[in-house]
Amino acid sequence: MIDFKDKIAEEISKVLELTKEELKEYIEIPKDTKMGDYALPCFKLAKEMKKSPVIIANEIKEKIEMPNKYISKIEAVNGFLNIFINNEILIENVLDEMESKKENYGSSNIGNGKNIIVEYSSPNIAKPFHVGHLRTTVIGRALYNMYKFLGYNTIGINHLGDWGTQFGKLIEGYKRFGNEYDLEENPIDKLTEIYVRINELCKEDESVLDDCRNNFKKLEDGDEYCTQVWQKFKDLSLKEFQRIYDILDVHFDSNNGESFYSDKMQEVVDILRKNNKLLESQGAEIVDLEYKNMPPLMVTKSNGSTTYATRDLAAILYRARTYDFDKCIYVVAYEQNLHFKQVFEVAKFLDLDEKYTNGLIHVPYGMVRLKTGKMSTREGTLIKLEDILKEAISRAQAIIEEKNPNLEGKEDIAKKVGIGAVIFNDMSNNIIKDEVFDWDIMLNFQGETGPYIQYMYVRTKSILEKENYTMNKETVDISELEEHGIELIKQIYSFNDIVKQAVDKNEPSIISRYLIDVAKLYSSFYNDNKIIVEDEKIKNTRLCLTYMVGNVLKIGTGLLGMEMPDRM
Ligand code: ARG
């Protein structure tokens, strides 16, 4: 697509002693469209040029040669240079792109040749998959899609929590009371129960804790019984997780979790030792991080077993070699901020190329706060995601039942709407913010929600179907586009840039907010303008706009991981 910002910067650079790249840093998109499509706040140049912003703005305005292919009007207002782009060129450009790229509109290949790892979901074996894991799953998948859309080679990894001292405990619990439980049915609930029981026993009796620690040591050493029991826990858990992944339609390129690194940690220890980074502390081995004002990172425990952090370090080594990553993104709750700061710091001592250590990125997200009484459970009990997803679907079903009881394919639609509502809610605000989980808010068809966007999409779809419309840019008459129409096309134009911004910041909510804006704008357009009118020119122009809006809504929600219903 034409990069208007680039073109404008180029024009200005011809009349100023600044490079195009420098100018691009300064040029902004004004909030109020009356102030132009782009603006250069000249106070940013005032110091260097030793002139007042007002004078600078006026001078640039005078010097830029008009008429200009890309610029229709320039104004100097209060030290701002306001630039209005040539709408006709923009609209033609959007029409060309849309017609040629269709469902790939907005995609690009800027990421070609770059490898991006997105690590997400990563639930813990034998523990419930809870709402926190829903956020990483949904956000991670969105990031994965977004990078892919821009041409990056993207690798999705589910770093399963399937290793660690807790399995020593669980094995001990299973040994002691496993025969009281039928693990085939609701295995995770039962394993959780076993885990709670053995923990209590450990508190009462120190020797039980020793047995547990021993079990994990044995597991690390490949003991047959321990491995077999652990594998059973893992298989049962994965089967449960898979049901959730199926509902969400989430996939991974690799499921190499913590246990995958059980034989790859010695190297980490060896390198750290060779580099004199390991200190002994009460039998354990640690890396001092005092100089960074952080607590030390424990690499091996006093009984010789490894830690969560050591596995993360081994994973970094492995991923650097296997995937040659440019970025390795960890979508993990902000509770683990310190952990990742420590791990990324220690990774600098692993003799890796800086490319890799600079590419380690923790993308933290906020907690999920539960609103309704039913969802806030007693302390210690986590809410199971599967129940939430099922409730979302049944609530969507109830709404459909009430509003449109004769709708065909109700069940499938309820699923798309219910799950879509949950997914959108997870990313409707900056992901670092704590999320409020409130059914009434997220399922409000009039609110800033997933279902609202789906609803607007379905509207576009039904209009287009009625007219049997396929896009043909030749039938569009630009002069028939009114204010809202032009504004909409400008929004559609910015879609690719929105995805780039979202990728640069690892912030999917940039896309969700954009989609809300597009849907709202279309809604105003639709309220002010009949689409199906007598005049063929006007009708075709409005139909094309409708098609483009629908397409962008579908592509954008697809990036977020939502599915669009055809009817609602
Ligand atoms: N399994 C962990 C948890 O549920 C998350 C793993 C995060 N990823 C990592 N590489 N440490 O809390």
Image (cartoon, rainbow, N blue to C red):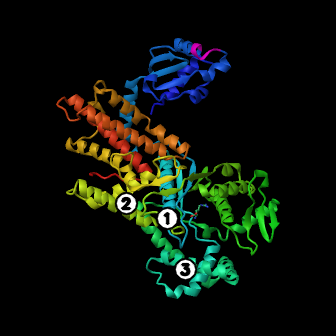
Disc ID at residue 194: 3
N-terminal-most mark, 3 or 1: 1
Locate the N terminus by quadrant.
Answer: top left
Secondary structure of the residue carrying numbered label 3: helix
Name the kind of residue labelled 2 in the image: Ala
Q: Which residue is mark 2?
A: 392
Name the kind of residue labelled 3 in the image: Ile
Main SS of the magenta segment?
A: helix
Q: Is residue 384 magenta?
A: no
Disc ID at residue 130: 1
Secondary structure of the residue carrying numbered label 1: loop
Q: Which residues are magenta?
A: 51-55
Label 3 lies in ligand 1 vicinity (Cβ under 8 Å): no
Q: Position of residue 410 (x, y in %)?
A: 26, 59
Q: Position of residue 451 (x, y in %)?
A: 35, 50
Q: Position of residue 183 (x, y in %)?
A: 48, 81
> Looking at the image, which residue is at 20% across and 43% down?
466
* Ligand 1: quadrant of the figure: bottom right
Q: Is residue 331 visible?
A: yes
Q: Is residue 218 visible?
A: no
N-terminal-most mark, 1 or 2: 1
Neighbor class of circle 2 (other Cα within 10 Å; few <14, some 14-19, many 20+) is many
Separation of marks 3 and 1 at Cα, in angstroms: 18 Å
Viewer-closest of 156 and 80: 80
Q: Is residue 52 magenta?
A: yes
N-terminal-most mark, 3 or 2: 3
